[in-house]
């Protein structure tokens, strides 16, 4: 077998091996990007669930406190004042939660967009190399 043919086969095999390695590395990056995205989603879902649970508990505690105060009221006007104060406080809590939710959703959307851009760039970079 001529030396030129052997060199050609060796170079072709080396090139093929390099491409296979690049393909494997690229697929690992894509898999990692997907894993990161899914992991982040699960983490955020758990955080949201925990926050909802804490809010429900706080609301229940506020209701029980109001009931206790109402049971201690000595007059109708005192009971009305206790109820009015409780409604005002709960309204302030709801406004605070709405603001926090809006800020949180804005952050999630921004982070999601950034993550999508990063993942797209990784996939695009991988495709260019392959």
Image: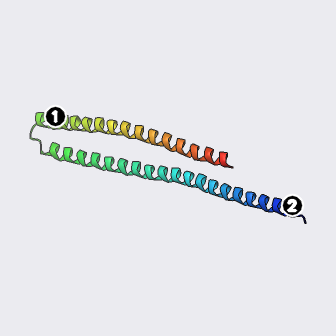
What residue is shown at x 32% (from left), y 50% (from top)?
Answer: 54
Side of 91 where 72 appears, left or right: left
Side of 80 where 5 appears, left or right: right
Element at badge 1? helix
Side of 62 where 34 appears, left or right: right
- Spatial CA span between label 1 and label 2: 99 Å
What residue is shown at x 86% (from left), y 64% (from top)?
Answer: 3
Q: State whether residue 2 is above or below residue 122.
A: below
Element at badge 2? helix
Rendered location of residue 28, percent (x, y)? 61, 57
Other-residue count near label 2 (Cα within 10 Å), few / some / many at <14 / 14–19 / ≥20:
few
Q: Of residues 72 and 57, which is closer to you in this image?
A: 57
Q: Of residues 107 and 99, which is closer to you in this image?
A: 107
Rendered location of residue 46, percent (x, y)? 42, 52
Other-residue count near label 1 (Cα within 10 Å), few / some / many at <14 / 14–19 / ≥20:
few
What residue is shown at x 13% (from left), y 35% (from top)?
Answer: 76
Q: Of residues 11 and 99, which is closer to you in this image?
A: 11
Residue found at the far right of this picture: 1
Q: State whether residue 49 is above or below residue 79.
A: below
N-terminal of the two: label 1 or label 2?
Answer: 2
Find disc 2 in the rendering and name its residue.
5
What residue is shown at x 74% (from left), y 61% (from top)?
Answer: 14
Residue found at the far left of this picture: 74
Find disc 1 in the rendering and name its residue.
80
User: Quick one: quadrant of the N terminus?
Assistant: bottom right
Rendered location of residue 99, percent (x, y)? 32, 36
Q: Of residues 94 and 126, which is closer to you in this image?
A: 126
């Amino acid at each position: 077998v001529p030396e030129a043919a052997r060199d050609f086969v060796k170079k072709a095999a080396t090139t093929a091996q390099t491409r296979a390695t690049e393909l494997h590395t690229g697929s690992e990056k894509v898999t990692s990007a997907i894993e990161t995205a899914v992991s982040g989603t699960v983490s955020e879902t758990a955080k949201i669930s925990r926050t909802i649970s804490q809010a429900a508990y706080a609301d229940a505690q506020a209701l029980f406190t109001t009931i206790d105060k109402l049971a201690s009221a000595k007059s109708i006007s005192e009971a009305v004042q206790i109820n009015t104060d409780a409604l005002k406080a709960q309204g302030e809590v709801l406004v605070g939660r709405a603001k926090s939710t809006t800020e949180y959703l804005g952050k999630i959307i921004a982070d999601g967009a950034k993550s999508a851009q990063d993942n797209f760039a990784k996939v695009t970079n991988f495709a260019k190399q392959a």
